[in-house]
Image (cartoon, rainbow, N blue to C red):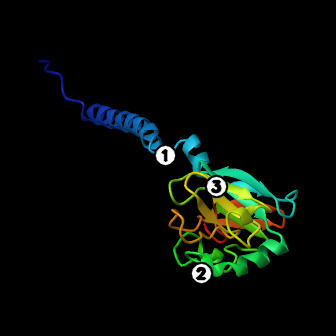
Amino acid sequence: MSNAPVDNGRRRFLTIATSVVGGVGAAGAAVPFIASWNPSERAKSAGAPVEVDISKLESGQLIRVEWRGKPVWVVSRTPKMLEQMKAHEGQLRDPASEEPQQPESAVNEYRSKRPEIFVAVGICTHLGCSPGFFEGNFSEKVEGTDDGFYCPCHGSKFDMAGRVFQAVPAPLNLEIPPYTFIDDTTILVGEEEGAA
């Protein structure tokens, strides 16, 4: 061992410098590690709200968009469709939409924010098939009703508000996703008005 005197100032400097370099290194390793816990851009976009332009949506027409990997229908209901919905309420399993298949803003007779625009997840509540839209020829499935949705897989039937008829396999009405009108011609599917 050397008999040289101990330089406490130098020792303190080396201790502090080593601690600082170690702390910076630990922070440098922790930042990417913690960032890896965040969802990927692909995962974020899978759950992100979807804008739907309805400016060219004609009366009686249905358009499909995808939100969270599910088909979402946007239908422009005609006055006749709206009127016929009242005529078959006694044939429906849940006409008042008491089961929680829709946001609070869609708990009404039309299950929508605007009577003429219907937005629903196009997946049958029985086994997850996608029903077809029968415009003008639904009376083959339900007498006295010209328009509705029919699932050919197991025969489930839904009216123009997505309400399920009785005596079919589907137990619940079609799901209504959260959505809001950005303006008169644009709907944001996946985000409820006032949600942060």
Contact (CB < 8 A) between labels 3 and 1? no
Contact (CB < 8 A) between labels 2 and 1? no
Q: Considering only order in the chain, which callout, 1 or 2, is on the residue closer to the N terminus? A: 1
Residue at the (37%, 37%) spot, across then down: 26
Question: Where is the N terminus found, in terms of image quarters?
Answer: top left
Residue 77 in percent (x, y) is at: 79, 68
Residue tagged 3: 131
Residue tagged 1: 38
| Left or right: 41, with 182 as reference point | left
Residue at the (66%, 74%) spot, across then down: 111
Residue tagged 2: 96
Relative vertical location of residue 51 with respect to residue 32 in this rendering, above or below = below
Quarter holding residue 105: bottom right
Local packing at callout 1 (Cα closer than 10 Å; few below 14, some 14-19, many 20+) is few
> Disc 3 or disc 2, which is closer to the eye?
3
Type of amino acid under label 2: Ala
Relative vertical location of residue 95 with respect to residue 26 in this rendering, above or below = below
Residue 91 in percent (x, y) is at: 61, 77
Relative vertical location of residue 57 with respect to residue 10 in this rendering, above or below = below
Residue at the (81%, 66%) spot, across then down: 183
Local packing at callout 3 (Cα closer than 10 Å; few below 14, some 14-19, many 20+) is many
